[in-house]
């Protein structure tokens, strides 16, 4: 395969041996190649860097392949079923990466309308996507988190993420399965839908991020802050429900009740805000004003899941704002309310 190389450029690559020399290898021939050994163990490979071929160059990475990293440009494709990268695997400019086996080192990334599809294998670092990229996770393990930025789309149905899952800047995430070992963040106008799977720590919406939860499980707390919005109609939360400043959590279901710290239980109706019924707790550490409202909320979500969670709402003092936890009706109730209004209007018309 070396006779297909257009050029080699030496550069200093600092590893455990500071004087090691790495090479950039350019492959721009528009053909299909298979890497199955360590021929490129000290090389970074660039596909179609100089030439936009049609179709683009294609590389198969199979068992035995060993290299520093590969970057795909200009509609090129990489199919990884085995082998190992010590550094990165990257797709740029409408390129595609499919991973079903093997091991990637520091990072895997997709940029500029490129895509990553992962069925298996392991990424020892991060997976990053930005600028209209798309990622499909149907298996495999990612050790240090996923970061979605700049209108990317990520769909996760299986696999595991060893750290956190972060969506930023108008990105979109759909999670129907798999496991996130730490936190799930949705921030800066990003949107997320969780229908299944497990988030072992917190789910957080912030800075106009929106999260719709219809299933799955949250191992710790549900948090909405700084104009973040969470709507929960299904699934479960093991910990507490938190609202800060202008963050809103909507609970969709029936038979909601709140019990304050004095043991007084109140049945809630559509539109009720939990801060109107919870106990006020003054909290002034170090001269700050962090008072909050608290209590226990029980009820049945739209998916028939029973909930019983402590809540805390910070919307006064240093956290002054419109944040709250609000009861909304399940869809069947909305329909009945609408039909009731229609009947009343007909009766008035008949009268």
Image (spheres, grey):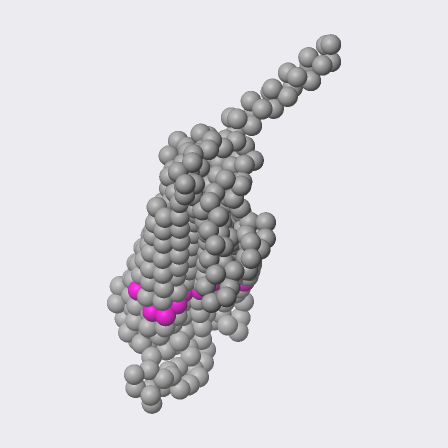
Given residues 254 and 81, the one toward you in this image is: 254
Q: Could you tell me residue 277's position as x and y percent?
A: 50, 40
Location of residue 180 with respect to 111 vertically, above or below:
above
Looking at the figure, which quarter contains the C terminus?
top right
Given residues 123 and 198, the one toward you in this image is: 198
Location of residue 167 with respect to 306 vertically, above or below:
below
Residue sitting farthest toward the top? 351
Can residue 31 be seen here? The reply is no
Q: Could you tell me residue 229's position as x and y percent?
A: 53, 48
Please report the bounds of the magenta region as a residue range: 103-113
Given residues 302 and 278, the one toward you in this image is: 278
Q: Could you tell me residue 328's position as x and y percent?
A: 53, 35
Q: Could you tell me residue 155's position as x and y percent?
A: 44, 49
- Residue 211 in the figure: left or right of residue 342: left
- Place residue 346 in its image quadrant: top right
Residue at the (39%, 70%) spot, across then down: 88
Residue at the (55%, 60%) spot, across then down: 318
- Place residue 264 in its image quadrant: top left
Q: How many marks?
A: 0
Residue sitting farthest toward the left? 64
Q: Main secondary structure of the magenta part?
A: strand
Can residue 47 be seen here? The reply is yes
Residue at the (51%, 26%) spot, across then down: 332
| Residue 128 magenta-highlighted | no
Residue at the (73%, 13%) spot, across then down: 349
- Residue 6 in the figure: left or right of residue 34: right
Location of residue 63 with respect to 302 vertically, above or below:
below
- Place residue 234 in its image quadrant: top left
Looking at the figure, which quarter contains the N terminus?
bottom left
Given residues 330 and 309, the one toward you in this image is: 309
Residue sitting farthest toward the bottom? 19
């Amino acid at each position: 395969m070396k006779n297909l190389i257009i050029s080699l450029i030496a550069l200093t690559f600092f590893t455990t041996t500071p004087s090691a020399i790495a090479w950039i290898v350019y492959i721009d021939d528009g053909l299909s190649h298979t890497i199955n050994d360590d021929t490129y163990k000290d090389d970074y490979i660039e596909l179609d860097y100089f030439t936009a071929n049609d179709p683009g160059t294609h590389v198969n990475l199979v068992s035995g392949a060993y290299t520093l990293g590969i970057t795909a440009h200009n509609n090129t494709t990489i199919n990884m079923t085995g082998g190992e990268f010590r550094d990165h695997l990257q797709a740029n400019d409408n390129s595609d990466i499919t991973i079903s086996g093997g091991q990637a080192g520091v990072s895997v990334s997709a940029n500029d309308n490129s895509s990553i599809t992962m069925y298996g294998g392991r990424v020892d670092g991060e997976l990053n996507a930005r600028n209209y990229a798309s990622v499909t996770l149907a298996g495999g393990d990612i050790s240090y988190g996923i970061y979605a930025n700049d209108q990317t789309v990520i769909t996760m149905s299986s696999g595991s993420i060893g750290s956190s899952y972060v969506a930023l800047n108008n990105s979109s995430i759909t999670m129907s399965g798999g496991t996130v070992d730490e936190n799930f963040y949705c921030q800066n106008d990003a949107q997320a839908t969780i229908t299944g799977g497990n988030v072992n720590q917190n789910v957080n919406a912030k800075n106009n991020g929106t999260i719709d939860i219809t299933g799955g499980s949250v191992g710790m707390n549900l948090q909405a802050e700084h104009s973040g919005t969470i709507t929960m109609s299904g699934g479960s939360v093991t910990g507490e429900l938190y609202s800060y400043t202008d963050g809103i959590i909507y609970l969709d279901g029936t038979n909601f009740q709140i019990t304050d710290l004095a043991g007084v239980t109140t049945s809630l109706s559509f539109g009720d805000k939990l801060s109107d019924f919870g106990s006020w707790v003054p909290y002034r550490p170090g001269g700050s004003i962090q008072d909050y409202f608290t209590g226990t909320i029980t009820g049945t979500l739209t998916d028939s899941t029973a909930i019983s969670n402590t809540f805390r709402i910070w919307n006064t003092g240093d956290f002054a704002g419109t944040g709250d936890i609000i009861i909304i009706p399940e869809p069947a109730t909305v329909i009945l309310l609408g039909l009731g209004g229609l009947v009343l209007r007909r009766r008035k018309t008949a009268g």
